[in-house]
Image: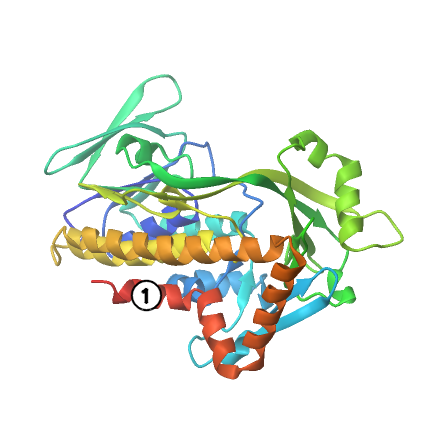
Amino acid sequence: MAAKQRVIVAGAGPVGLLTALSLASQDVPVTVLESEPGLSYDLRAGTYHPPSLEIMAPFGVTDEMHQTAIKVPRWQMRDRKQGLIVEWDLSEISDLTPYPYRLHFEQHKLTPLLYKRLLTYPHAEVRFSHAVKNVNQTADKVSVTASVPGGDDEQLEADWLVGADGGRSAVRRCIDADLEGFTWPERFVVIGTSIDLSKYGYAYNAYVADPDEWCALFKMPGDGPPGFWRVLFPVLPDESDDVALSAENVERRMQGFLKIDTPYPVISKIIYRVHQRVARRFRSGRVVLAGDAAHLNNPLGAFGLNGGIQDCANLTDKLGKICRGEGEASLLDLYERQRRTVNLEFVQEYSIRNFKRLAAKTPEERQANIDDLRRIGESAESRRQFMLVSTMIASMRRANAIQ
């Protein structure tokens, strides 16, 4: 029997679609509103940690991802001058998860998998070109005003609204839940190349510390074997986007990272600004936030999208119970306590730590970081604890322990 209560989800990105899919699978009627005319094509996120794969597995998504994704059981911390510092092997935590690896799979490939499954439910729908303009609520209902093609606004009513509409969330603005934190002065440029960096000793995921131009590497499946590599560099404030993305500077950065005899073949390049911010609240009455609408962080460690997927699992478990009359609305206060706390003390803390570790300037600080990583790598127990954090298993455990 379908639940009596209906949910509107703003945003048809991975978090919004997964939220809708999870609710629909619990017989909750759900409507997704997406401002764009179709699914977005995002060139940034693409790394999935074990908990995310476990969360998506019941829907058949994880199995389908594996058909073309790249497994990354080992990843590296390196220094541009000293080379390899430590290599982490996630098979050491295979007793904790059926997926002891990172999975590389572009975000723009995930959303169609979620969308396809969502549309198999007759009580679920996605309305594209529906941009949230305003939100009003009473004690019993929430009303959403959405702009639609043709100029006339559309009014939709539901029992609950989930704002999963990204970093520029209209839902967050409507409930006055400002983002608190800061924006890094550096921007990030991500360059895609077909050169096989594994031939030079790099794992499919590696972070390379350097005081002037650190970088991060990710092997991605692309359109199929042999795939391609994304290489991420910082861009200083005095360098314009156009200059950073010029062929000359793209080549300079790549050759500075790894000198080769030929020009680098470049298949993609993007630049974007990076934030460390958390909404001052995740809930206002019948409205809750999840994913980038609730928190933003730098991508070093791949905590952003994965944190949003963990939001989704936590939220839909509670909201499904509420919609079926099996739980009180106060469960959403618990969601806020659990997910906002771990975003403040885990996602923000460790993503900032990762950034500072790569960008350390003084020889003393750089050597201290190297010594610390080597010390961790020498002990099976310290490696295990490090990997619990880096895989976000520790984040899930911490959230679940909060009452």
Give residue 336's position: percent from left, percent from top. Answer: 25, 51
| Residue for point 72% across, 59% down | 80
At x 17%, y 55%, the residue is 331
Along the line of sight, the residue nearer the viewer: 266 or 279 = 279
x and y, in percent, of residue 341 in the image: 31, 55
Q: Is residue 217 above or below residue 89?
A: above
Q: Position of residue 162 (x, y in %)?
A: 28, 43
107 vs 83, left or right, is left
Q: Is residue 1 left or right of residue 113?
A: left
Residue 208 found in image quarter: bottom right
Residue 119 visible from this viewpoint:
no
In the rendered view of the protein, which quadrant contains the N terminus?
bottom left
Q: Is residue 390 visible?
A: yes
**Which residue appears at 45% of the width and 52% of the height?**
305
Q: How many labels sit on residues?
A: 1
Q: Amino acid at mark 1?
A: Arg
Residue most toward the front? 364
Query: Can you name the residue that lies furthest to the top here?
Result: 151
Q: Which residue matches tag 1?
A: 398
- Crowding near the residue tagged with mark 1, few <14, some 14–19, many ≥20 C-alpha atoms within 10 Å: some
Depth check: 284 or 156 in front?
284
Q: Position of residue 183 (x, y in %)?
A: 48, 39
* Left or right of residue 70: residue 127: left
Q: Is residue 382 above or below residue 132?
A: below
The answer to whether 17 appears left or right of 239 in the picture is left
Of 218 and 267, which appears nearest the observer? 218
Please, what secondary structure does the residue beneath circle 1 have?
helix
